[in-house]
Amino acid sequence: MTTAAIVIGLIAVFCGAVLQRISGIGVGLVAAPAFTLLAGPQLGVFVTNTATIVSGLLIGLAVLSEVDWKRFGFLAGFAVLGAWPAALLVRDANPAILTIFIGGIVLIALMTTFSAPRLPQVSSSALTAATGITASFLNTTAGVSAPAMVIYARVSRWPQRSFAATMQPTFMALAILSVTTKLIAGVGIVGSLPPWWFFTALVAAVIAGVAVGSAAARRVSAAGMRRVAVVLVTLGALATVVRGIVLL
């Protein structure tokens, strides 16, 4: 990754952290297409997963009292079943196809996250388990688990405050699982990792984003931030799809 690419990626992480502090989701949606464009699908999603670990930890510390730990345990427990096949897919897939897949998943995430209609109520352990598996698969391959989580929250009528809080340790756990399984599976990223100082800067970008998001939450509506995010993420996702098509 060039210095310019690193700076652009860090800005994307900062913007995602601001959004995630306000609405509960955002780092993966903003960072995944940006880093995929800048560093390719394998390394780009790996770096996105790393950013999600940091943001989930930092934001989660502020909302621990509102986390639904029982539901978190169920989602995270079944996530293992989705991470392993996803890691093998990332290792063996054509980079161009994987790039198109990531861009497409992010576009679907936008539709399900911000514009999906009201869905019928369903609540069952099987649905929670299926959500954990699906979210983990998407997080490992594309760095984005929001589509599965938002649909699950809507059909199960999960209250927003509890959902937003529980997503922080959930996103962190899924990202740790994604990073671990890809390293064990031998995904070719170790030799192309950014310099060590990048990860220090990544943590700083998340901290700054969380701080700004905390201040903005008292002055800016979540709806307004979502509209800004939709524009940023749509442009990034469309560019990612086009890049994948060109690579073909």
Image (tube, rainbow, N blue to C red):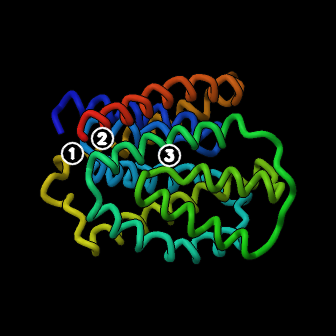
> Separation of disc 2 and disc 3 at Cα?
27 Å
Eyeballing the image, is 149 above or below 116? below
Real-space Cα separation, disc 2 to disc 1, in angstroms:
6 Å
- Establish if 71 lies above or below 56: below
Of labels 3 and 1, earlier in sequence is: 3
Query: Which residue corresponds to mark 2?
Result: 201
Query: Is disc 1 surrounded by few (<14), some (14 to 19) or many (20+) residues within 10 Å?
Result: few
- As measured in the structure, the alpha-carbon distance from the residue carrying label 3 to the one carrying label 1 is 30 Å
**Does the residue at mark 2 contact the one at mark 1 (Cβ under 8 Å)?**
yes
**If the image is split into quadrants, where does the C terminus sit?**
top left
> Please, what secondary structure does the residue beneath circle 3 have?
helix
Residue at point 29%, 59% (across, down): 93
Q: Residue at x 80, y 55 (%)?
A: 155
- Residue 160 percent location from the top left of the image: 77, 48
Dividing the picture into quadrants, the one containing residue 170 is bottom right
Query: Where residue 21 appears, x then y in whole percent?
Result: 59, 40
